[in-house]
Amino acid sequence: MGQMRNGLLPLYGVFVATNASGLTAGGLAKGLEVFAIDVATGQKVWQWEQAYSQSYVPNATPTVISLITGVDGVNRLYAGDQEGRVWELDATTGVNVDNGNSVCASPPCNYPVFDAHSTAASPQPITTNIAIAKVPQTPDPGSAFANYPGHKLLLFGTAGTNWVPASVSGNIHATFWDQADRVPYQTGGWNLAHTINWSASQAQAYASTYGILQEISPGLPHTFGPGERMYGAITISGVRAYFATANGPVPNDIMLLNGRTTGASYYLDFQSANPTNPITTLPVPSYANYGGMTVFHNTSTGADDVIGLEVSKISKTSDSSGKSTANKALSVTGQGGQIYYLKSWIQRFFQ
């Protein structure tokens, strides 16, 4: 929810992403739809649609919308779809900000902000929020982000849904957001690493294949182990992004995660990430997390305490010592044939 400009008047709106209904004449059979709703009246302000073109992709519900605000309210929306693409929309009009029809040789050139290159063999739907972060002004020398002080990033993960085959691995992407870091599809110019000087047509070809945001390599994107995929929320805390994975399919309602589902928690440190292996594994939890972590900075130890909801307990991990404590452990998951869940983000103590 946020303030967007409608002419000269401020408008308080809520932004919703959903799958296409296909119920109206001329409506999409399947795809991504985004709506802007006027909070005061409940009226639709605008609607944006993007059809799915791949037969293997179901008409599943997308993840939540992410927003970037300016001096006059919300000005950009980010929406991920089931074909592995992220789209950047203008909050006032709902148009795709990255449309190149005016310059490309063969319109339509409706570029995504990023394309994860999903395939039938390895589907990569966007299955986390689109988190927004910023590299510190003085990243450590030699870190993965040493050459990008103060640059903004969009982070998101893939493959964490129930229709993706169990053997498929997910990825985490960290793409550079600033205008100077984008693919120069209108004029041509240098790529992110300043190793390729594109012509405008070459930049447009790249944008149509990969999107207009770039990410550093090696190290990112990071691919997880066999069958491990991302879901839920990426939490930005200070110079770190915390996130969770699960091994195997994740139901559309993450509150229905099987109590035996294993997983892991990680962080990406923008200050000192290793260029070739930037992802650090937290020692716990060993079971899947219910989709989000809360991070508290412990002033007495100087470490961050990471609170996560495992499927069988609430656990706290110190990112420096690696020690874990359980506020309240439940019975061993699966003991006596019983499966345990946390209900409504609160511990469930009853069978």
Image (cartoon, grey):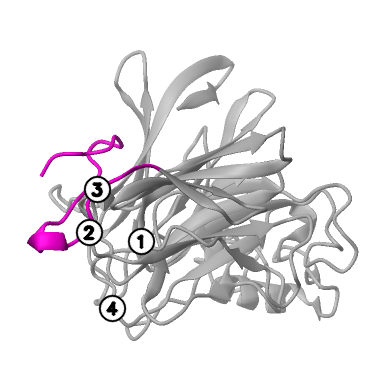
Residue 98 seen: no
Mark 3 belongs to which amino acid?
Met
Image quadrant in which you'd find residue 126? bottom left
* Tag 2: amino acid: Thr
Q: Earlier in the sequence, mark 4 or mark 1?
A: 4
Residue 308 placement (x, y as % from top left)? 44, 46
Q: Residue 54 location in percent, x, y? A: 30, 75
**10 Å crowding of disc 3: few (<14), some (14-19), many (20+):** some
Residue in front for this viewpoint, 274 or 260: 260
The image's mark for residue 166 is 4
- Residue placed under numbered mark 2 in the picture: 333
Q: Residue 255, which numbered label? A: 3
Callout 2 secondary element: loop
* Image quadrant in which the N terminus is located: top left
Q: Which residues are magenta?
A: 327-351
In-image side of 86 versus 161 (left or right)? right
Instruction: Using the rendered view, name the quadrant where residue 259 is placed.
Output: bottom left
**Disc 1 marks which residue?**
287
Judge whether 191 appears above or below 236 on screen: below
The three-letter code of the residue at mark 1 reads Tyr
Q: Is residue 156 above or below residue 248?
A: above
Which of label 1 and label 3 is nearer to you? 1
Left or right: residue 238 versus residue 163 is right
Q: CA distance from mark 4 to mark 2?
A: 21 Å
What residue is drawn where x is 24% and y is 55%? Answer: 252
